[in-house]
Image (tube, rainbow, N blue to C red):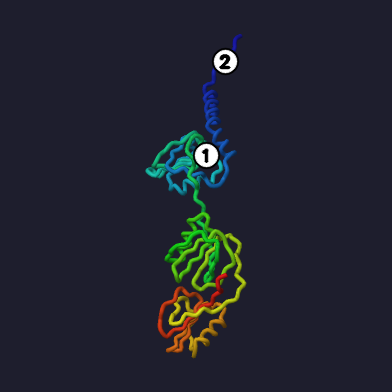
């Protein structure tokens, strides 16, 4: 008696589908094992080619975050013309495309170098009424404290700066030394730098006859009979950096910040200062 074997096409089809699924899934699984969470390398003007695991419409920032948060995502590209985001489980190659931007977990073999991702902007701790002597890199005109700070931020060698508000001058510094009391100045020191400390030197009063101080006044004007009396009021207050006394009106103004001085007859002014070393 003979037994006839029939070929089961349904089982064969299921086996083929399973084999295909394994081949398709393998790169994705590999990417999940080798991918590292964190920032992606930046490839502006780039279109990727590889194993696409997802396509969705969203903004480029959300597309980048979606890939960054998935350890199995080897990279993404985003089209500005269609707003389409594609996630990749594996990347075979890339080509230039001005309408697309891409990010990848690792550098793309045989393609150009990624664009360096800009770090957070450098910030500075401010010390109003203080000068930083020495370590000069460069100096020039500046119209504001913010502009002087920007000059330092743009110079990689700059670790500190001093802005002389009265003279509109900006001094960039490569290092720090002890801070010197100076009513004309505000100093900025790169955040994270050790505190420079304060200079241990006598504080004196520098006088400006027929000049009036402008700045941040401490409270209301006070009555005083002489410049010496007005000056004593300033010495009695630690936050007082300068004063102006009107001989005619017997009026005394105290300041915790002096942004400038201007000629005016009948005025007596002064500011606390530590002389230059």
Q: Quadrant of residue 213?
A: bottom left
Q: Residue at x 47, y 48 (%)?
A: 62
CB under 8 Å between callouts 1 and 2? no
Q: Nearer the viewer, residue 231 or 41?
A: 231
Residue 83 picture location, percent across and down: 40, 45
Q: Quadrant where the C terminus lies? A: bottom right
**Could you say whether the residue bearing mark 1 is in a helix, strand or loop?**
loop
Q: Measured along the vertical axis of the image, is residue 265 above or below residue 39?
A: below
Alpha-carbon neighbours of circle 1 within 10 Å: few (<14), some, or many (≥20)?
A: some
Q: Residue at x 43, y 64 (%)?
A: 141
Residue highlighted by disc 1: 107
Residue 5: assigned label: 2
Q: Residue at x 55, y 27 (%)?
A: 19
Q: Measured along the vertical axis of the image, is residue 27 above or below residue 85?
A: above
Residue extending farthest left: 81
Q: Nearer the viewer, residue 199 or 91?
A: 199
**Could you say whether the residue bearing mark 2 is in a helix, strand or loop?**
loop
Residue extending farthest front: 277
Q: Quadrant where the N terminus lies? A: top right
Q: Kindly report the distance in space between the C-alpha atoms of the residues bearing marks 1 and 2.
A: 54 Å
Q: Measured along the vertical axis of the image, is residue 152 above or below residue 220?
A: above
Alpha-carbon neighbours of circle 2 within 10 Å: few (<14), some, or many (≥20)?
A: few
Residue 95 picture location, percent across and down: 43, 36
Please tell me which of labels 1 and 2 falls first in the chain. Answer: 2
Q: Nearer the viewer, residue 133 or 92?
A: 133
Residue 124 picture location, percent across and down: 53, 62
Residue 246 picture location, percent across and down: 44, 86
């Amino acid at each position: 008696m003979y037994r006839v074997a029939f070929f089961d096409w349904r089982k064969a089809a299921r086996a083929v589908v399973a084999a295909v699924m394994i081949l398709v899934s393998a790169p994705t699984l590999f990417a999940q094992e080798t991918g590292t969470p964190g920032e992606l390398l930046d490839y502006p003007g780039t279109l990727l080619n590889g194993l696409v695991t997802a396509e969705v419409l969203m903004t480029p920032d959300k597309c980048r975050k979606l890939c960054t948060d998935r350890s199995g995502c080897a990279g993404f590209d985003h089209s500005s013309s269609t707003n389409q985001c594609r996630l990749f489980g594996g990347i075979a190659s890339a080509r230039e495309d001005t309408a697309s931007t891409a990010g990848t977990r690792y550098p793309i073999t045989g393609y150009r170098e990624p664009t360096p991702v800009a770090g957070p902007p450098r910030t500075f701790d401010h010390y109003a009424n203080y000068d930083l002597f020495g370590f000069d890199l460069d100096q020039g005109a500046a119209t504001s404290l913010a502009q002087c700070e920007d000059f330092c931020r743009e110079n990689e060698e700059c670790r500190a700066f001093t802005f002389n508000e009265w003279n509109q001058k900006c001094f960039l510094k490569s290092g720090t030394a002890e801070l010197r009391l100076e009513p004309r100045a505000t100093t900025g020191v790169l955040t994270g730098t050790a505190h420079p400390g304060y200079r241990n030197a006598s504080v004196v009063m520098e006088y400006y006859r027929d000049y009036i101080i402008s700045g941040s006044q401490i409270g209301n004007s006070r009555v005083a009979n002489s410049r010496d009396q007005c000056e004593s009021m300033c010495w009695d207050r630690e936050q007082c950096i300068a004063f102006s006394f009107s001989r005619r009106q017997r009026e005394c103004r105290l300041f915790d910040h002096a942004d400038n001085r201007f000629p005016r007859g009948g005025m007596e002014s002064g500011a606390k200062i530590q002389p230059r070393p």
